Amino acid sequence: MTDPSKPATIYDVAEHAGVSISTVSNVLNKPDRVAAATRTRVLQVADELGYLPKATAIDLARKQTGRIGVVAPFSTYPSYLRRLVGVMRATRAQPVDISLIDQESAATASSPLLASMPIRGVVDGLVVMGAPIEASTEERLASRGLPVVLVDADSDRFSVVNIDDHGAGRRAARYLLDLGHRRIGYLSEAQASDYESQARRRLGGFRDELAAHPDVVLATTQAEGTMAAAREAALALLDGPDRPTAVMAHFDDLALGVVHAAAELGLDVPGDLSVLGFDDGPAAEAAGLSTVRQPFEESGSVAAGLLLEAIGGATQRRMTLLDCTLVERRTTAPPR
Amino acid sequence: MTDPSKPATIYDVAEHAGVSISTVSNVLNKPDRVAAATRTRVLQVADELGYLPKATAIDLARKQTGRIGVVAPFSTYPSYLRRLVGVMRATRAQPVDISLIDQESAATASSPLLASMPIRGVVDGLVVMGAPIEASTEERLASRGLPVVLVDADSDRFSVVNIDDHGAGRRAARYLLDLGHRRIGYLSEAQASDYESQARRRLGGFRDELAAHPDVVLATTQAEGTMAAAREAALALLDGPDRPTAVMAHFDDLALGVVHAAAELGLDVPGDLSVLGFDDGPAAEAAGLSTVRQPFEESGSVAAGLLLEAIGGATQRRMTLLDCTLVERRTTAPPR
DNA sequence: CGGTTTGCTGGGATCGGTCACGGAAAAGCA
DNA sequence: TGCTTTTCCGTGACCGATCCCAGCAAACCG
């Protein structure tokens, strides 16, 4: 009835139910303001007509969008997709849409962010991941009063969620020490400008823990961020009289490169060489790599939670640090 | 000037520029309808005021949302995240937002889909991935005239984008045959109800290709969808006098289980046993697994492209079949 | 039984734009 | 100069809700 295949509006419902549109609106939003009889009648008419409130109209009237934006270099770094899953989980219960904004690279953060925001206006808040956000951008965002939560980045005006890289570094070092290793290598990523501070903190923690053991020898080296480059670098690192008995790499793929290098040199892993990765991505599990697990999903859900609170009016800025856990697989063991 | 920290509206711009709001609107939307002088003046005022058209208002007035929804079991099957990346790529150039709708499982498709749509109304179109969409849902969607593109699913009213599983099965079989294998195993996933037809097609293609070689022996078996279960199943499959010299698994993780089983049995891979996976996920690369690569990202971008066309008015339904390619790594070789 | 309280409902302004139309000014032409 | 065309711009009707506020009737009170 009365279905010219046009979606029903609140007016249609009101008319069919013999009430005014505000009553229909109330039924939907403040049910207790409406008499039970009217309510059921309206409700019934509503679903007879297949009425669905138009989100666009609601948003306009309420001056909000019911949408949060998630900005990250998704297509460049797949790990952000895992964080995104966390965001989805955290918002599942709420009537909140997630709007994606892909960034080519964290390095080019400012311009896409500024450029794309204007295009399709408005969100209620933003989760910005992996972007060393530019001061001017920060300024703009803040001046609009837009709630923003940063993940994997620092800021002194927005809430941030970070991995405890320093602590993770310490933990990894402690683990290797506890196994009995005393000659230890560390392979970091060269030119990871986007994540410089992150890498520095991780290595810093690693160093700090080792510092307690003056007898320990640490050899550090760098490689481009590919497995092949890591292999090369590891080949050099492992070639020599006092080669390390354990190597930690800045992330899983690099560690896998080390594993390959070891195989090439005829070293048994973990017998002759322990290898420890970082991230616990899918590759780590497949390869049986011992590694440090970053709570990717959790960082997403925590950030989303903070953002939701901020949108809800919370003004208290918060800095969250998330712990990493060690995952022991088949590439680490006491030195022989 | 005139900045009570409230975002500027079109009215503010109009007033400051001494024109009417429709002129401002025209400047933005149909610049050639406005005299050059006026245009520049308006434009200048606009950015002095930091004016940004509100997306919500535009959407309401235009009766569209500028948003497409992507429905998939993201948090259950990470491969959908890769497809999502494809969607992002395809829509990057357009002023289109992506709205995420996570589904717990493809199996429970209908209810979340119906349930969540009402909550936050409206999108211009939907990409539904991995959901054997229910007839009634299909009906509802279609009756609203909402453009829908299905990925990894069948339908006789919406456009679909599928992987050519049959062809991929053939190709895999041909590859193993060409290597010289004659006793071949196939490990499929048990109870993959969501993807039954997909799995069937893949195995079907595999069989069809082998059929041309009457001398070939095919042994099929099943396992739950975990690496451990695959290991068990493979143990049984490989235990016996006439064990296969090559095994293909329905996806990478299963194949990895086979690799483990082989190691356990003291079989050399690929010397004694070739193992072929499917998907080419991150695990495959890490483990050096030969596999069949599914064009995940491409399926996403193709689907997004079709959807955009449909939203643009194209009514022609289209069925796309995407090819897989073989990735040769270190787990396949001629039989010894 | 008049006056107050309480509970429900409706009126109407508002959100910030889009767009079809129409009218006035400017330009073209005889 | 008078009339027709163009070119530009403004008027005003939506789009589909939310939500404040006022009106009104029934219930309550003494």
Image (tube, coloured by chain):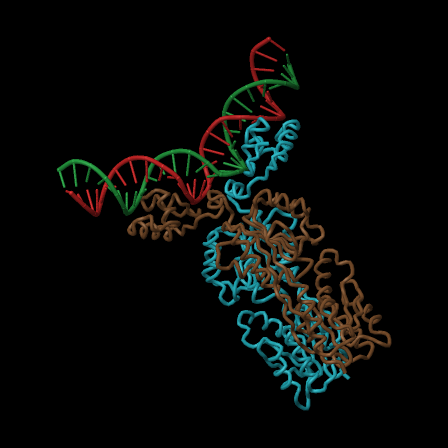
Chain colours: A cyan, B brown, C red, D green
Q: As rendered, which of A95 and B212 lies closer to the eye?
A: B212
Identified at 63% across, 27% down, the residue is: A38
Say whether residue B237 is left or right of residue B62.
right
Q: Of residues B327 and A118, which is closer to you in this image? A: B327
Question: Of all residues shown, which one is farthest toward the bottom?
Answer: A241
Residue at point 78% right, 80% down? B272
The front one of B19 and A50 is: A50
Q: Quadrant of the N terminus of chain A?
A: top right
Rendered position, A254 above or below C24: below
Which quadrant of the figure has residue A235? bottom right
In this view, A302 is above or below C7: below
Answer with left or right where residue A194 lies relative to residue B241: left
Locate the C terminus of chain A and report the quarter of the image it occupies.
bottom right
- Residue at coordinates 66% horizontally, 54% vertically from top-left? B154
Given residues D26 and D14, the one toward you in this image is D14
Indicate whether B183 appears above or below B101: below
User: Can see residue A322?
Assistant: no
